Image: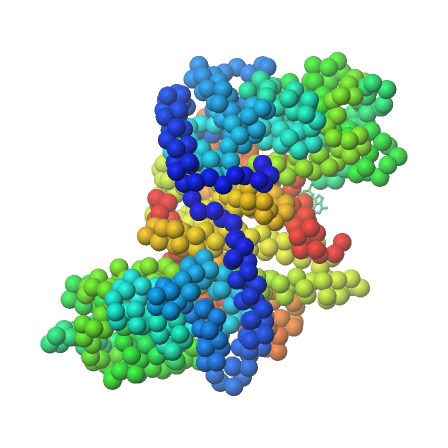
Amino acid sequence: MPGGDIVQSHSELEQFRADLRAWLEANCPAEMRDGRRDETTICWGGKNWNFASPAQKAWLEACAGKGYTVPRWPVEYGGAGLTREEEKVFRAEMDRIGARSPLESFGIWMLGPALLHFGSNEQKLQYLPPIARGEIRWCQGYSEPGAGSDLASLQTRGEDMGDHWVVNGQKVWTSYADKADAIFALVRTDRDARKHLGISFLLIDMNTPGVSTRPIKLISGASPFCETFFDDVKVPKANIVGTENRGWDVAKYLLTHEREMISGGGGGLLGGRALGAVLADSGADVAGDVTLRAAAMTCEVDAMAIGLTLERYKDQAAAGTGAGDASAMLKYMGTELNKQRHELLMAAGGSDALEWDGPLGGRAADWLRTKANSIEGGTSEVMLSIVSRRVLGLPG
Amino acid sequence: MAKLVVTEEETMLADAARGFLDEAAPVAHLRGLRDSGQTRDAALWREMASMGWTGVLIPEAAGGSAMGHAAAGVLAHEMGKTLVTSPFISSAVIAATALRQVADARANAALASIADGTATYALALDEGSKFNPAGTEMTARRDGNGWQLTGDKTFVVDGGHADRLLVLARTDDGLTLFDLDAGRAGITRDPRNMIDARDAARVRFDAVAATGDDVLGTVDDGMTVLRPALEAGQAALAAEMSGLAAGAFAMTTQYLKDRKQFGVPIGSFQALQHRAAHLWCELEVTASAILNAGRQLDSDPGDASLAVSLAKARATATAQLAVIEGVQMHGGIGMTDAFDMGFYMKRARVSAEWLGDYGYHASIVAAHRGF
Ligand SMILES: Cc1cc2nc3c(=O)[nH]c(=O)nc-3n(C[C@H](O)[C@H](O)[C@H](O)COP(=O)(O)OP(=O)(O)OC[C@H]3O[C@@H](n4cnc5c(N)ncnc54)[C@H](O)[C@@H]3O)c2cc1C
């Protein structure tokens, strides 16, 4: 959340901490306190969501009631309106009891921040509270078969029919498109303009006639992403975010939030636990295996420093002294580190980690999944090019 | 939780330091000292004293400016950018922090002499080629009411010129920290010709007499005084190294814009762009660890070990990468003595070893993190 936080006294924050502790004690079900954060435990929400347990449902409802699914969002849009300092206390207290995240979604990570910045007041009131309550699940329609790193060359087009557009085209790599209720999509609405200037950011209901999806199987065995087809899909004019043909601004802003979220993997994917502890849990001889130990120590040093960098940028943003967009750096560093960590976890697991359903459960699937971290949301090479151009001012 | 935001005062301090150092101590200053066979500029140290830098960690009552560890880091970072030659870390950070732990009348007088620039200190700790305080073997044998110190210290940074030495030696039941005049009978200093052209000496102690007045803190418990001093020094050194890395990086990015090959600036080649961008990312991440260490030392110095070792480990790796890439991206000119990059490379190597290398500090991080 951008700048302008009020400054709070130490005693105010401690009061907040005490109240929060009591609330967590009363409301966080025991089952939700194992600190887990993986595909099998995440609550994604949405109209078709099947809760994994009554505890998962109760935990989501309790948090949604307090705005704790999106603690920094304003109260009127379903958040808790916490300041940055309160949010730090909130995260620390959640971590202290190993509380699972009550809700994750593309709405929280990506669309919400974009709407808060670019949406009209009606759009904010219409779309944000259902995201905060986990009642709607969004997916992201950016990439196309011919438009990956060169995203702005996208060809899905919207034809202006007065009060609505008719959208035709194809998206690809659309994560969870088959499970989502709605998609935020980049659509070319002016074919004559320069490529960045003819794109609009549209919100499309997945139940609209003409929208269809086809799952794609990943190397990790799962098939969480899809091809998404638009066949004469009618989209009301009210469903545009920002200005017509200026959707690229919205798209880029959203990407900075997506990248920051993906970069968190460097510190967060192990549920905040030190790599050494996780390695030891899997029976690895961390003390005796000198190669493993040396590599793990370096990973841990880097993970902690990257975690601090995430915190530093959030502190700067809250203090209104943000040094511009650092999401490319964070995304690059966080994802490359996360890939290394999972290489170590596989090495530590040895042959036990090689069975899909072996003693180390989903380790291989997790390892394979992390390979996408440095591709999705913009590849590492693209991140480095962004730093090179925007930060270092190198030519070309 | 202390905020990881650079304050306005810190920015002003950095700007003022930069302005002064660009005039008084650019890299050419170090080159001039080296070419004339010197390792000290006493006038520069006096100016640092007059600006309050030597007293950055010294209470106002003892004539210091008491700006704190984060501020010391800001100064060290700026000094690192141009490889400033001064006993700042040995005296104003390590010795000042040790003396502050004691804070009796004698220690306060010593603090005042650091603050006003009249005394400099060096830490005589290492005995082997690696930093290892716990492995100290030099003995201080009981002799009547006092002790006799005998043994060899090595890599005593700033030890060739220091007025006083902090010496760690083994006593009956532990390690004891002594604060000795460097000219005391039985001390022989052998200033070495260091690769980075700075002051470092091997120091021999031959039955050097010491009394209870020379002991800092408690007999057999020198680490209680020395540990916080080492952590303060490691944090400041990490900050200096991050400045060194930033200095080398700035030269390199400028060269990428200026140097032309194949009719275009070499900075238009993506292979070099990505290497430079990666290096910048490493610098940014290290900056967070440095700031965090300063904040932690200022807010909760008793619990700073993890933050400090994280900073020194990161700074060591980043400085190393910055100078390796710095030479490579300059091509042949980077290898010449006439060009400054070599000075950065050599200082980075010396700083990597001083006060604990990468493995030493990464192991401490690992231990804090449960493995
Ligand atoms: C698991 C997963 C989930 C995803 N989810 C979504 C989603 O929900 N919605 C969505 O819209 N998209 C999604 N994506 C797509 C993702 O954003 C794209 O894969 C990504 O932007 C890269 O595009 P591409 O696959 O076409 O690769 P390409 O752009 O073809 O890249 C191929 C290689 O070339 C390199 N390269 C390309 N251009 C340059 C250049 N200029 N300089 C140097 N190197 C270059 C790349 O770095 C890469 O190594 C997902 C991807 C994955 C793997």
Dividing the image into 4 quarters, which one contains the C terminus of chain A?
bottom right
**Nearest the eye: B121 or A318:** A318
Picture residue at 70% right of the left edge, 52% below the top:
A389
State the image coordinates of residue B255 (x, y, percent, origin top left). 68, 65
Q: Name above or below for residue A202 compared with residue B329.
A: above
Q: Name above or below for residue B34 compared with residue A135.
A: below
State the image coordinates of residue A370 (x, y, percent, origin top left). 55, 36
Asked whether residue B364 is in view, the answer is: no
State the image coordinates of residue A25 (x, y, percent, origin top left). 36, 24
Horizontally, residue B40 falls left or right of residue A46, namely left
Horizontally, residue A155 falls left or right of residue A300, namely right
Picture residue at 26% right of the left edge, 71% below the top:
B106
Dividing the image into 4 quarters, which one contains the N terminus of chain A?
top right
State the image coordinates of residue A38 (x, y, percent, origin top left). 49, 29
Horizontally, residue B366 falls left or right of residue A212, namely left
Picture residue at 71% right of the left edge, 34% below the top:
A250
Horizontally, residue B18 falls left or right of residue B234, namely right
> Outermost residue toward the left?
B144
**Nearest the eye: B336 or A287:** B336
Question: Which quarter of the rendered image does ligand 1 occupy?
Answer: top right
